Amino acid sequence: SRNISAANILKGIHVSMADRLAKLLKSIKVSEGVVLATGGLALDIGLIAALNEAMEKQKLSIKVETHPDSIYAGAIGAALWAAFRYEKLAHLQQLAKAS
């Protein structure tokens, strides 16, 4: 704590995460475009602001955007994967019964 406010600690975490992502994008030669943030942190306006600041700091023409429904992206992906696996396993069960 050392008289550091919770808001400043959180800002430090945001800046650290944002700097790492910007450096990663720069290292793989992504220098322009749009990055869509998904998951629960996509609604964290402090993190999104830090990400956009980090892109500018690294001289990247990348805009980090989000959508109010982006928190559901992981759940939708998991549901689609589960449906695929279910169908595949059902098909394998039918093959096993047929032989």
Image: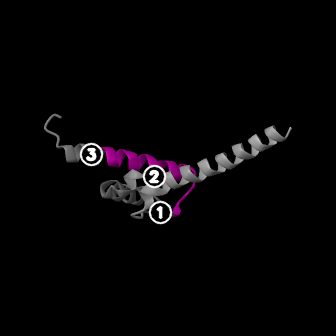
- Magenta stretch: helix, strand or loop mostly: helix
Q: Quadrant of residue 49?
A: bottom left
Residue 27, position in %: x, y? 54, 49
Under tag 3, what secondary structure? Answer: helix
Which residue is disc 1 drawn over?
62
Residue bearing the label numbered 3: 10
Q: Residues in magenta?
A: 13-33
The residue closer to the viewer here, 52 or 35, is 35
Please, what secondary structure does the residue beneath circle 2 have? helix
Is 95 included in the stretch rendered in magenta?
no
Q: Which residue is located at x 86 percent, y 38 percent?
A: 99
Work out whether mark 1 precedes mark 3 in sequence or the reverse, and give the earlier one: 3
Q: Amino acid at mark 1?
A: Ile
Mark in front: 2 vs 3 = 3
Amino acid on which the number 2 mark rests in the picture:
Ala
Please tell me how crowded label 1 is: few (under 14), some (14-19), or many (20+) other residues with Cα within 10 Å.
many
Q: Which residue is mark 2?
A: 22
Q: Secondary structure at mark 1?
A: strand
Q: Residue furthest front?
A: 97
Among numbered discs 1 and 2, the one appearing first in the sequence: 2
Q: Identify the residue at horizontal 84%, vertical 41% (top origin).
A: 98
Q: Which mark is residue 39?
A: none
